[in-house]
Amino acid sequence: MRFDGLIGNAELKEQLSSLVDNGRLPHALLIEGPSGSGRKTLATLLAKAAVCRHSDGAARPCGVCPDCIKADAGTHPDISFYGGSDRARSFSINTVRELREEGYRLPNEAACRVFILENAQALTLEGQNALLRIIEEPPKHLRFILTCRSRFELLETIRSRTFALTLGGVGEEEALPWLRERFPGQTEEDLRTVTRLYGACLGTIAEALADSHWKDSLALAPSLAEAILAPTESVLLAKCAELPSRDPALVQGVLRELRLLFRDALTAKYGQSGRMSPSPQTADKLAASLTAAALLQLLETVEALETMQRRNINHALFITEACAKLRAAVGR
């Protein structure tokens, strides 16, 4: 299988190539990964590979056969997209009923039909249960590709009947050529900084560079980290409250920057060089004020908060939890 346009994720590509090349691709796939990791890109590539007419599986999607051309234009009658919004429970049971009815119709041109369900974590519980009925016993001509932030946002019954694929960030040196080509006006230092900050998820990086909101992360994360050292909880709570409720990418960026800060502080604590965060002064201040055990606990806490935030927790509850957990990590 060919993966034109999808950077990184070498192990996943090798796994998928083996399945596609040998005609063993499961009927239902679940692609998980953070925003900007390439979920839609991979789903579209797999759909194109499924309808591609090339006889050699290793050459699919070929990009030149009639089915690939129509798929590229978004007009292939056997590739359908459902969902799209990532708002909680915005993917209704009525949409699932519609796709179930449509799914039993035979393909128009290709050997199979492909349904891509974007942001499946937004399915209502009723919608997931309704979807389960057709995923359990699908028509032979039908393939499902679900995308989501995390498989654990879906019912276990859905997870157990799909083949999960996990997308991650790409390596920094893989990301930089792609970014240099698309953002020639950005400095090398800024490109490297934003790549580290957003975990090398290219879509999120591109979005951040387009409006420079990543610089807000750099401003907020150090002040939030220093607020952990304050004697009273109100200082940290006020800083946590500055995390925007309508910009999850920025919140994720702040959490990633915090993780880099705590990592650098731990490195400094042991007298080692090599800083990853753009705020070395804050890292040094944390190293001077906290024990190595506390810094380790802060790293684990931030990882837990990242998982919590990806699961679309209520923002007000997230702020309260973040404040309490960060204070507890340093014994306050």
Image (tube, rainbow, N blue to C red):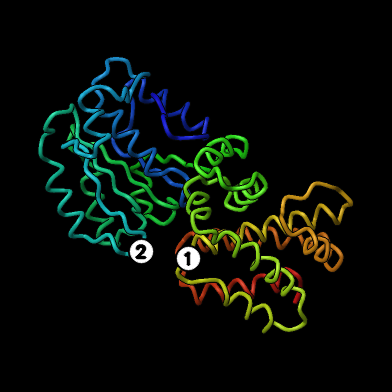
Q: Position of residue 295 (x, y in %)?
A: 77, 61
For the C terminus, the image quarter is: bottom right
Mark 1 vs mark 2: in front: 1
Residue nearer the viewer, 126 or 217: 217
To which residue does mark 2 refer?
A: 87
Q: Looking at the image, do the residues carrying marks 1 and 2 touch, with CB atoms under 8 Å apart?
A: no
Residue nearer the viewer, 124 or 172: 172
- Name the residue located 65 percent from the left edge and 62 percent from the top edge: 218
Q: Looking at numbered disc 1 in the image, what kind of residue is underneath it? A: Asp
Q: Looking at numbered disc 2 in the image, what kind of residue is underneath it? A: Arg
To which residue does mark 1 refer?
A: 247
Q: Position of residue 174 (x, y in %)?
A: 58, 35
Distance in Å between CA atoms under marks 1 and 2: 12 Å
- Name the residue located 67 percent from the left edge and 61 percent from the top edge: 258
Residue at disc 2, secondary structure: loop
- Residue 331 picture quarter: bottom right
Closer to the chain start, of discs 1 and 2, is: 2
**Residue lying furthest front:** 185
**Residue lying furthest right:** 271
**Vertical placement of 138 versus 209: above or below?**
above
- Name the residue located 60 percent from the left edge and 71 percent from the top edge: 322
Position of 68 with respect to 328 (left or right) is: left
For the N terminus, the image quarter is: top left
- Name the residue located 24 percent from the left edge and 42 percent from the top edge: 115
Residue at disc 1, secondary structure: loop
